[in-house]
Amino acid sequence: MKKFLLDVILFALFVAELSFHHLPKILHEILGVAMALVIIVHVAINFRRFKSLFKKITPRKFFIVTIDFALAIGSVIILFAGVCMSNYLFTDVVSLELRRNMTIHQLHVAIPYMMMILIGAHLGFHAQELRQRFSKVKNFFNVAIVVLSIIGAFGLFFNRVHDRILMKHIFATPATDLAAPLFMLLIVGGVIFFALITFFIDKKFLR
């Protein structure tokens, strides 16, 4: 239960950080530090489980390990870029040249949207565990997943996720004009959308 709660907190922090347009900048930085700490705890708790994936490598395990490594690398890049761009917590740590570096700014915007896909894939490979956890409300869970996936699919277009990943200069999208709860719902839906795709690929081709 504690591990699940930690995962929920980590996911909530990710969604909040991706919704930075709706947060005070200092709060965005504080939540970023909190997210870094939770990631460290998450990795420490699940490290033994991750090591077990290297025993008798299968195509499924290969994809899981690849996604986990990509998540780790993405997290490091985001956190490094966040420190470089800091206007409050780390201003005395980073040089002005790094703070003004456009590539670092673009990475800090683009990588989180790549992470949205990777987190979705990560959840998709663990979908069976989630379904068991919500077995008492199985029908509601299934309907919620489908509805959120549809919302997420539209959110990919509303938020121009493709262009963001390509590091194009985007300051606003139809999604960013929405109220914070609706924007966050699009992000959650986007993650669930990729989780559902991964679940079907896993079930059809990797098991």
Image (spheres, helix red, strand yellow):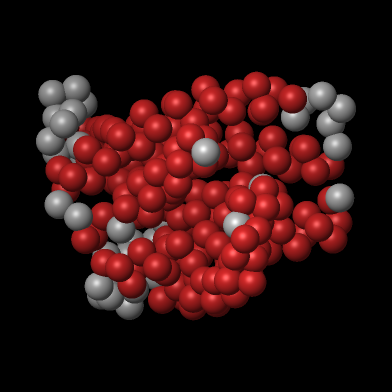
Residue at 35 percent of width and 46 percent of height: 13
Tell which of 198 and 42 is nearer to you: 42
**Whether residue 58 is visible:** yes
Residue 146, percent from left and from top: 60, 74
* Image side of residue 73 versus residue 55, left or right: left
Q: Is residue 166 visible?
A: no
From the viewer's perspective, is residue 174 above or below residue 126? below
Marks counted in the figure total 0
Residue 96 is left or right of residue 8, and the answer is left
**Furthest residue toward front:** 136
Residue at the spot x=44%, y=32% of the render?
Answer: 39
The answer to whether residue 192 is left or right of residue 202 is left
> In the image shown, does 125 or 64 lie closer to the viewer?
125
Residue 64 location, x and y as percent? Answer: 70, 41
Q: Residue at x 65, y 58 (%)?
A: 135
Front one among 48 and 117? 48
- On the image, the x and y values in percent for residue 10 come to 42, 42
Q: Quadrant of residue 53?
A: top right
Q: Nearer the viewer, residue 91 or 180?
A: 180
At a point 39% along the width and 39% down the height, the residue shown is 78
Is residue 66 placed above or below 204 in the rendered structure?
A: above
Above or below, comparing residue 191 to residue 4 in the picture: below
Left/right of residue 100 with respect to residue 14 in the rendered view: left
Residue 88 is drawn in which quadrant?
Answer: top left
Quarter-wise, where is residue 60 in the image? Answer: top right
Estimate the x, y position of residue 25 in percent, counting from the top left. 16, 48
